[in-house]
Image (tube, rainbow, N blue to C red):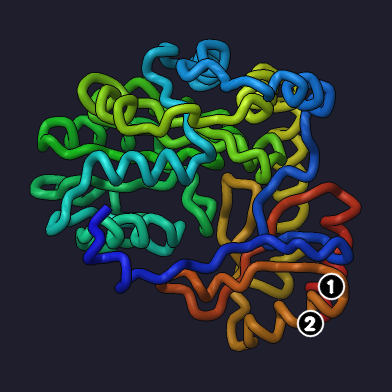
Amino acid sequence: MDPDAIDAVERVPHGSSDNPDLIDFSANINPRIPTGVKAVYRDALQSSGTYPPDDYPEYRTAAADYVGCTPEEVIPTPGGLAAIRLTIETTVSAGDSVLVPFPSFGEYHREVRLQGATPEFVPHGRILETDPTDHALVIVCNPNNPTGDLYDADELRHYAEQCRDAGTTLLVDEAFLGFTDQESMAGQASVVVARSLTKLFGLPGLRAGFAVATGSGRNRLEIARRAWTLGTPAAAVGTYSMGCSEFITETRGRVLYERNRMCETLTASFDVHPSDAPFLLLDAGERDPDEIVRTARDRGVAVRDATTFRGLDSHIRVAVRLPDENDRLLDVLDDV
């Protein structure tokens, strides 16, 4: 991190509400967690009187099975964002340029700027058309947040080959890929994958995730990561959750069905962006998004003001939750 850049960088807004009286559609979190998680957590807490093994063998093996790579290629991190920061810190130097998609996750350009580097913004739908030459890093969010667009797998692999030929690292943020059937880019040469256990497993407060990389890039991440990256409960619950295949299958099916159902209703009042993710981006047109957010909150529902994303000025974003909760959201948004 470049100390001279820190004072010029601000924090970025995020969704989520800690108000227990609101149904939170502003953060894209699975409202369910795998059965058995609480027991795993309790057992792990009893073992937290000593440091965890710094090599995290069980966690690495579970992550490797989960995304399809080798355990040695897995770098444990306290959440997907930590994997993103670690990648940028070990790849980007002051003065470098980085291709950053927009509208997309705001932490990308913030982390690039903290390195004293320059984010070169590219429309997210055209990022795979860019020339990666002379850039230190290219960032892709798949599926993209907040639009929900899933990149074509063959096109993404082809672009990864272009990055490798150019000597440019490709960072693929797969925070929401677990909600789809698409294979991970984990294990591809010159690619760093960032994964989060926050979204799919409904555990944002646990702070568990990982990066996947190969070759010298993997070595740099492993050397630079902090010792005892994960607490014992986070490692144990993460290991357990990544093996819950029935939970993953059920979640994918439920989100697909509910997302399609929500789209059918919401198109009467909003321009709904097609999505492969557990959220929907809604264009409110001439209506004030801030007013929609306030009105929904007054009626017990939190939705995300998406105008905080670069390039959006009339949008809100809503998560896909459980059927009864989604019905409540649809009723509220039908009146705003």
Residues packed near mark 2 inside 10 Å, few (<14), some (14 to 19) or many (20 plus): some
Check disc 2 and report the residue beneath it. Answer: 295
In x, y percent, where is residue 316? 62, 71
Q: Residue at x 62, y 63 (%)?
A: 15
In x, y percent, where is residue 44? 73, 21
Q: 138 or 51: nearer the eye?
A: 51
What is the quadrant of residue 190 in the picture? top left
Q: Residue at x 30, y 45 (%)?
A: 88
Which amino acid type is shown beneath numbered disc 1? Val
Q: Residue at x 21, y 62 (%)?
A: 118
39 left or right of 111 in image: right
Check disc 1 and report the residue beneath it. Answer: 332
336 left or right of 105 in image: right
Q: 274 or 9: nearer the eye?
A: 9
Residues packed near mark 1 inside 10 Å, few (<14), some (14 to 19) or many (20 plus): some
Q: Is residue 150 among what the camera can see?
A: no
Q: Split into 4 quadrants, where in the image is the C terminus?
A: bottom right
Which amino acid type is shown beneath numbered disc 2? Thr
Residue at mark 2 to residue at mark 1: CA–CA distance? 9 Å
Element carrying mark 2: helix
